[in-house]
Amino acid sequence: MPLPESIFAATLADLDLDLVEGQWPGELRGEMFVSAPVIDDRLDYQLFGFGAMVRISLRPGTHGAAPGSFALRTRVIDTPVQRIHSRVREAFTGGILGLDSVFGHANMVNTAPLAWNGRMFATWDVGRPVEIDPVTLGFLGEVGSSASWGGDSFGQARVLPQIFSTAHPVTDPERGCMWTVKLSPTPDGLQPTLVRWSGDSARVQTWPLEGAGVWGSMHTITQTRNWLVLADSGNFKADMNEVFGGERTCTIDATVPVYFVRKDDVERTAPGSPLPWVRGEFGPTTGHYYAVWDDSEGVRVLFEHLDLTDLGYRLLPGDVDAHGAPLNPAHVGFYNMAMRSQTVSEMIFNPGRSQTVSSRTISRVNDGDMWNLQLSAMDWSPEGMENPTHHHVVFQGRKPQMLARRVLDLYAGRAPEREIAGPETGARLVTFERGTLRQVGEHRWTSLEDLPSSPIFAPRHGGTPGGGDGWVLVPVLSDSGFRLECFDAARVSAGPVAVLGGRARQRVPFLLHAVWMESASPAPDVERHRFADEITDGVVAEALARLEPHLRDTVHEVAVG
């Protein structure tokens, strides 16, 4: 069995986790937030369901859990579009990028949580970030009005504008802002626009990067003290044949561009005016990458490459796998998994004033058994960003049963057939030393039934920053019941020091990215964008006026509710 059958069959629900193995570290504190898409049988791609937020408390007896138990609490994020949907579900249909409707495209906010100064946000590649309350998990507001973002990425006038963004914005500890991005189609690809939000305003500021272009998405942006780094992820390219109802046939590129913007240039450029930028290039493609804050000797970036992982292809009814066997129907709607073992590298770029950025690779690792890489656990504190020492990566293993033969045929000559059709392998948690990428720890899950998701790093209070002094927590999905496994970050090879699980071995559906937060307190009272104000904007108000009366009334009910 390549994946648990329950990833699309289980439902998200509150539960209390109990200690089932080991001893829970008394020093461990904080909260683990995890993003998850809600399963929806109208969608061809189950990663595009409405977003839910899961919070797992790392101290027993808190947030309503019984003494000695740990609270896992979840809530579907009640964004305006989710509330509209709950009233007129029949107005929504499944599309290539989630749910579409006469109102516009739904912002699913289902991919990643982002913690910022005690505040919590949920993100998606095809919508604005939204803020939720860390305690109630309820919706508070979208980041900035659509008008301040420049409106719909495609220039359409809709009540729910579709804004291509990034699932991984960054928050700047020195400038006190959030940096994110908007993408808009041009004949030369998707043009990035840099977006800055102060955190206490209903508007964002924007600066176009004229002449820059990406052909995939911009799933991540990262930063140093002086530079913003914006790369084409390249693993989800638009296929116009598919957009107009045909078969998907495009394939991902071997190398992709990366753009560097000096923060001082942003400060001296009026919002709305084009920014200067310089361009580099790297490969293979990537979803996640992280820059070291100190850029005194160049912009040093850790890349988690997604070698031959084309996230634009999902598994369909009738597919056969790499071995020629029929696909398990329980996995229809999942993405076509990695077609090659994946690479981790660190590179140093030297952006200056010339248009071409020089670079060199300082370390690179791929031991041939690094299949299906998940987002890393690392120390996101300012000290950890300044001097990272370790990062911890989950590899889910080789899964030939999750590879569609029709996709492998498109990649014939690029995908190593002998490796692809090899046996299924189990998952690994690997600790790498930053800089050298020397492997300093490894844990292997022996059961092929276990599917670990994105880990987090929880620092030890008063410990040494950098990612090696604290704990790594890994959610593990299984048909035998969900587990949360806790490792000593300095000794992951020793196995988990403690394991939590549901008393009735409750199962949990597919989970995406996670983040650690020191505590969950009510959100601060600051100015936020209100949906009631959104629908009075000229373009949105005109689109609202064109709706049928009962649909227009539904929008107004949500706006005042």
Image (tube, rainbow, N blue to C red):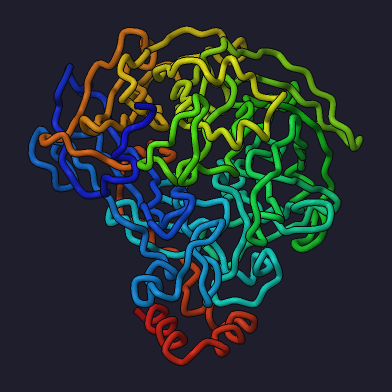
At horizontal 46% and vertical 25% (from top left) the residue drawn is 399
The image position of residue 124, as x and y in percent, is 52, 52
Residue in front for this viewpoint, 547 or 414:
414
> Which x, y percent locates residue 300?
69, 24
For the point 43% across and 36% down, the residue is 327
Q: Quadrant of residue 425?
A: top left
Place of residue 295 in the rendered image (x, y in percent of width and height, measured from the top left): 70, 27
Describe residue 17's horizontal placement relative to residue 523 as left or right. left
Q: Residue at x 25, y 33 (%)?
A: 479
Q: How many marks?
A: 0
Examine the rendering and report whether any part of residue 343 can be seen. yes
In the displayed structure, 492 sits above or below 45; it is: above
Residue 468's quadrant in the figure? Answer: top left
Seen as rendered, the residue at the extreme right is: 354
Quarter of the image with the C terminus in it:
bottom left
- Which of the pair 230/351 is nearer the observer? 230
Residue occupying image coordinates x 27% and y 49%: 12
Quadrant of the image occupied by residue 545:
bottom right
Residue 352 against residue 441 in the figure, above or below = below
The answer to whether residue 378 is seen in the rendering is no
Q: Quadrant of the N terminus?
A: top left
490 is higher (above) or lower (below) than 112 = above
Q: Nearer the viewer, residue 428 or 290?
A: 428
Closest to the observer, 252 or 400: 400
Percent position of residue 177, x then y = 58, 50
Q: Single out the residue that lies furthest toward the left.
A: 67
125 to the left or right of 66: right
